[in-house]
Image: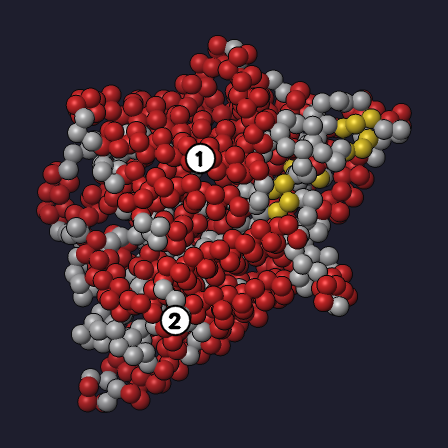
Amino acid sequence: MEVDSLRTSPKEYGAPFLRPWAAGTAATATLTGSTPTRSISEGTGNAGGGKNDDMDIVLPLSRAAAADATSSTSHTYLSRTSLEYIASVVSVIAILLTVCLYPLYRVGSGHHEELKANLRPPWALYRWLGSTGVDVTDLQLYYFVVAVPPALPYLMLFLMISRRLRRTAASKQAAIVREAIPNSSGDGKELGSLASGTHHTENVTCDGTNDSGTFGPLPPALKDMSALQVHHIISGMLIALCLCGPGFLFGVALMLFNFYLIAPLYKRVSFRASMAVMWVWHVSVLFLNFYSHGYRFGWFGLGFLDNLWTPLIGWSTQYNMSVLRMISFNNDLWESASCGEERRQRSLARHARTCIACAQIRDQQRHLAASLPPEALSCYKCRTECPRHVEEFTLTAYLGYILYLPLFMAGPLSSFNAYVSYQHHRAKSMSSTALWRYGFRFLCHTTLLVTLLHYVPIMAMLLTPAAAPTEGAASGAVKVRAAPSVPGPTGPLTITTGAMAMSAERSPAWGEMRNIASAVNATTTAAAATATRSVLEQMTLEEKSSLFFFSLAFLWLKFSVIWRFFRFCALLDGFDPPEDMPRCFANAVSIQSFWRDWHASFNLWIVRYMYIPMGGSRTKLLSILPIFFFIAIWHDIELRLLFWAVIICLTFMTEIVVTQFFSSKNPLALRLKRSPLVWRYLRVFGAQLGLIELAVANAIGFSIGAKGAVLTVHQLIDNTSLLYTAVMTFFFLCIGIIAVQHRDQRAYEEQQLKIKYDLR
């Protein structure tokens, strides 16, 4: 289990069912906007705060005070040195390797010829270590692996130019401030540091705040970030055209339509009316893009543009990410126009009093805190909540935000407010040592993923259709069916597991993949040609259940690698977007906590731009269905994803009802919570159920569809051996124990941080 961070939202901890943090308000744990954080050793998290409104440095407590604080808070969590915890960790590792992973390895080896269509030759090192092929079934990951190596020099050049433009803009800021401030207003020491170089150019308060904290007019230098924004536009457009082809120009046209017609609606109609028009427009465009399979230049007499080159990713697929950014831009603009100054001051004051992450940044930057503006010492969430000036919502800022290269292809998602804020003030939440340690963790995750793909072809076993005998069966030739024979939808192989989602049938590069499969199939043996069932259908029920669990593990590991790579690039550029996978998928004590930590930046986007405008906690039960409906159609418009959304909504609402019961003053709930052991194992039991529900729901939404999952679950219930059932029950029990221990320990550590920084 991955232990990356302290959870820092004070709403997270309490005593509801299934989780240790949500007394009273925990029913909206996923929908209240907790920001994913990093460990203390990395500098800070993404949500936190300090006590003083003037954002002064919050120094650590003295040793005596810290000792008193520690003694005043009891250790209520299970110790990691306890026999129960150690036995749980050892049991999970042993069962994973022997009961789950090794049988799947044997299945992959035994059916190598049938899976060969979706395997490529192994890498040199793994070939030497006995691997017979690497799984390339997941087109999303395949394109990522193919595209990243040649793109690395381009990314390095992008970062170099970006740093240069930042230094140039900072020098101009320093020169303007030097001319604007009379010599008599200071001793000249600070101005001298501004003139001497650009390493500390953020020491100038250029965020529009004066000494009294009012939201005054912007200095001209702060507005002049157009050169950097144009750099973002050009670099993003080049990558978009290379990967998505000339068709991406249709997406640019839709972006301009939003900027000139949708965004200014607040000037003509009410906020609610403009919100309704915006949502209807963007959802309609998603459906229109899907049913038209994009658009063609031939409709406008420019057919030669349709075939200039074969794109790697359809532009309409990539456009889905841009939709989220357009909605973010519109909402941030409307917020700035309506209550920008008031909300900015309120957000800064609240984070100064309550935000652990902001307090950690001030503590880490104590040697510069006196000369840095409050905005430069704030976390991502504070930068998102602080509105920008209306004058900053320009066309170059808008397009630069959408096309910002490190985050353009897959995220993590960032708000427009945070994007502009990080342009003026680089992120200071992570030291250089912590940054490179983050990069090393990314390499470790990548190595684990590559190793898994070489020895356990999870997606190939799950999605490879049965081979049908053909006229060339005698000579060993086979033909892959156009439709899979696994239970479930009969459509083409589809990868719709998040950002960069794609359908193989609509993918422009799918022809290349079919050619590869045909070339490999030409050498397939006659024995495989007579197969009438897919590998999944030939697996035992125990092997299928292990495969479903590991398919969820594969998705988590894949997205962890993809999102961490792009986030690492953004961190090198001074941007600090949220961590999308802050912890292991199995380290979740509830469905709500799982979705908060799975594509966490998307969850923050949902909270800010859907959940809160729809009424927040007052209408939480009514808002769940439209939220997950939008999530489903945003990934892809398919029936199985709608089934997935319905299942998630039902389990979500059930969990909220149970949480509210155990958060109430019901005598039974109070009696159960009086016993720490009983209460802890009730939460462990809830974590078990949640993980099983998630495995089934994701198998329906992103793997084999509703029919296949239902059939397999029925078979598991009816035919699974008693021994295997007992082993897997014990396995999920141990996972629940580990997850609950981690959350309880983080709750305790959070309280210690609040005491240390004197936060509310």
Q: Is residue 201 left or right of residue 69?
A: right
Residue type at mark 2: give it.
Lys
* Marks 2, 1: nearer the viewer: 2
**Disc 2 crowd, CA 10 A, few/some/many (<14, 14-19, 20+):** few
Q: Quarter of the image holding residue 245? A: bottom right
Does dot 1 land on a helix, a strand or a loop?
Answer: helix
Question: Is the residue marked by circle 1 packed among few (<14), some (14-19), or many (20+) residues within 10 Å?
Answer: many
Image point (71%, 50%), residue name = 509
Q: How many marks?
A: 2
Instruction: Give the residue at the far top of this rendering.
Output: 722
- Position of residue 430 relative to residue 560, above or below, is below
Q: What is the secondary structure assignment of the residue under circle 2?
A: helix
- For label 2, the residue is 267
Q: Position of residue 563 (x, y in %)?
A: 49, 50
At a point 31% along the width and 67% down the height, the residue shown is 338
Residue 88 in percent (x, y) is at: 37, 24
Q: Which residue is mark 1?
A: 648
